[in-house]
Image (cartoon, rainbow, N blue to C red):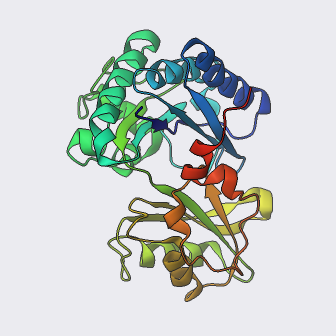
Amino acid sequence: MTTLLAVPNVSEGRDAATIDAIGEALASSGGERPGVRLLDIHRDPDHNRSVYTLAGPPGALAPALLAGARAAVERIDLTAHAGVHPHVGALDVAPIVHLGPRARGAACAEALVLGDLLARDLGLPVLLYGALAQGRTRAELRRGGPQELARRLAAHELQPDFGPPRAHPTAGATLVAARPPLVAFNVTLSPPATLEQAKTVAALIREGGAEGIPGLRAIGLALASRGDRPQISMNVERPGETPLARIAGAIRRHAPVQAAELVGLAPAAAFDGFPGDLPIPGFDPARHLIERALAAPASD
């Protein structure tokens, strides 16, 4: 049986009741649609963002995501949101992930069904990105934040792929894609590194920068909960070509590194050769490597 993943990101990483309610909505829908499993929840108060990872067969993930999206729309008000992560929606992104080329068609179909459900049932404008939108990126759609996206929709500079031609007043818009696995990976710098240094290193190593690591998206941020400690926040879009060890080495050439962080799950190959002296607090291979998480028996 084909298994797909879904990795919905919501714009709330501080309020435990909201994060848990969204998780419960996603998980409880699995009882109605056998085979859907909630594998992981990653919450971050500085980014003010939570990332959920679900697994399930085609036809089941889109309705499960709709249940989670409904809870997010009911509980998250973007007009009161504050966090360092770029975003445009309460349910900000909702990619469907295929684990091999044979499942790509199923993932594309599931993503299109999801876009239609979010628009029809919740009144959200849905914009596609990635392969379903001729390569349009999340960064293009998020540029300027939710207010700028709302303006572009209202001015008809952007047309949603599903839903109304205007932003939801409190939930913004949702970005949907079908894609292979990527790795969300953060590196926190040690003193005396600064935010400006984190931004400079991110610009150097990301795709298009002077050192241009293929498929790497990177920005520099400051973590208020950790005394404004600088962080390089990254998406590794082709982890099979670019192991995390290469990225860690590139950062270490330019700045002192304190620790790394994995957001959600990653393919095991991404950690090939990973340096043993770079800690990843909370990382559990049994839970956070895709192959092992999927092989584990479902909990009751």
Would residue 152 be visible to someone looking at this image? no
Q: Position of residue 300 (x, y in %)?
A: 74, 25
Numbered disc total: 0
Q: Residue at x 60, y 63 (%)?
A: 186
Q: Position of residue 99 (x, y in %)?
A: 41, 46
Q: Is residue 273 above or below residue 105?
A: below
Between 62 and 292, the one lying in front of the other is: 292
Between 261 and 81, the one lying in front of the other is: 261
Would residue 132 be visible to someone looking at this image? yes
Q: Is residue 279 above or below residue 22?
A: below
Find residue 114 and report its image quarter: top left
Find residue 189 and report its image quarter: bottom right
Q: Residue at x 69, y 41 (%)?
A: 13
Q: Residue furthest left?
A: 134
Q: Residue at x 60, y 49 (%)?
A: 264
Q: Is residue 4 above or below residue 59?
A: below
Q: Position of residue 145 (x, y in %)?
A: 46, 43
Q: Position of residue 94 (x, y in %)?
A: 46, 35
In the rendered image, which quarter contains the N terminus?
top left
Please state if 150 lies on the left or on the right of 170 as rendered: left
Between 78 and 234, the one lying in front of the other is: 234
